[in-house]
Amino acid sequence: MRIVLLGAPGAGKGTQCKRIAARFGLLHLSSGDILRQERSQETELGKKAQSYMDSGGLVPDEVIVEMMAGAISNAPLSGFVLDGFPRTVNQAAELDKSLSRAGQKIDAVLNLEVDDDAVAKRITGRRSCPECGAVYHIENLKPKVDGKCDNNDAELVQRPDDTLEVVKNRLENYYQQTRPVVDYYNANSQVCNIDSNRDVDEVTKLVIEKLESFASV
Ligand SMILES: [Zn+2]
C-alpha cells in the first residue's frame, strides 16, 4: 500500500501515520524527519536544503521531491505512508511522475479534516517537558500534577511555535499551498475524508477501518 495522509497542521498526521505504519507494516516517511536527517548527515541534498534555510527561504519543491523519492525507493514491498508530503500541488504532480517511472502509483489518500478552532485549541494547549520531550495537553492529555512532567517532575513549557499567532500563520499557509493538494487528488477520486475533530483513538479506528476495507478489495 502506498498511502498519502493529508491534513491541516495540528490534525494529528504524525500520530496517525505512526499507527498506520505499525498496523500495516509500512514505512512511515515524514518529510520533516527526513529533512532533519539529511541536514544532520550533511548529505548533498541536506546541504542544499540547509543553504535555502540559512538564507531564510523555503526549501524548493525539487529538493524536497528528490529527497522523498530517494526515501521512497528504499521502502519495503509492503509500502509506505507519507506524512507532510506532498505539501504543494507541484510536489504531488512530481511525486506521481516519479512513481509512474517505477511503475507505481499512490493507492490511497486520506484527508484528516479538522476545524480551525479545534486546531488552534490543540496546538496552543500543548505543553512539553524541556528535559525528556514528553508532550501533554492542558485539556486532553493532562499531566498528573498540573504543569509538571510525569516522568521527571520538570516544569512544562509551551514551545514558541505553539502560540495562536504562529498557528494562524501556519493555517493560512496551509489553505494557500497544501489544501489544493486535496483537490489535486480528488480529481482522481482518490481522497477519503476522515472527521478528525474527535478523540485521537477514534480517528485511528476510522482510519484503520478505511484502509482495511481498501486493502481487502
Ligand atoms: Zn519530562
Image: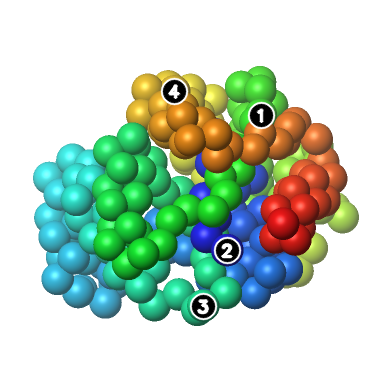
Residues under labels 2 and 3: Cα distance?
A: 9 Å
Based on the displayed image, in which of its 4 quarters is residue 26 positioned? bottom right
Q: Is residue 157 visible?
A: no
Q: Give above or below for 190 relative to 121.
A: below
Residue occupying the far right of the picture: 144
* Residue pictured at 18% horizontal, 65% vertical: 45
Q: Quadrant of residue 103?
A: bottom left
Q: Is residue 118 visible?
A: yes
Secondary element at tag 2: loop
Tell me the CA gap for discs 4 and 3. Answer: 34 Å
Q: Mark 3 belongs to which amino acid?
A: Leu
Tag 4: amino acid: Tyr
Question: Mark 2 vs mark 3: which is more N-terminal?
Answer: 2
User: Dot 2 corresponds to which residue?
Assistant: 1
Is the residue under label 3 in contact with that under label 2 (CB below 8 Å)? no
The answer to whether 152 appears left or right of 173 in the picture is right
N-terminal label among 3 and 1: 3
Which callout, 4 or 3, points to the residue nearer the camera? 3
Q: Which residue is mark 4?
A: 175
Residue 197: x percent and y percent?
75, 31
Badge 3 is on which residue? 77
State left or right for residue 102 relative to residue 127. left
Indicate the quadrant containing the N terminus: top left, top right, bottom left or bottom right. bottom right
Q: Which residue is mark 1?
A: 114
Q: How is the image coloured?
A: rainbow
Q: Who comes first in sequence, dot 2 or dot 1?
A: 2
Q: Badge 4 local density, few (<14 within 10 Å), some, or many (20+)? A: few
Mark 4 / mark 3, whichever is N-terminal: 3
| Spot occupied by residue 215 in the image (x, y as percentages of width and height) | 70, 60
Residue occupying the point 47% across, 63% down: 29
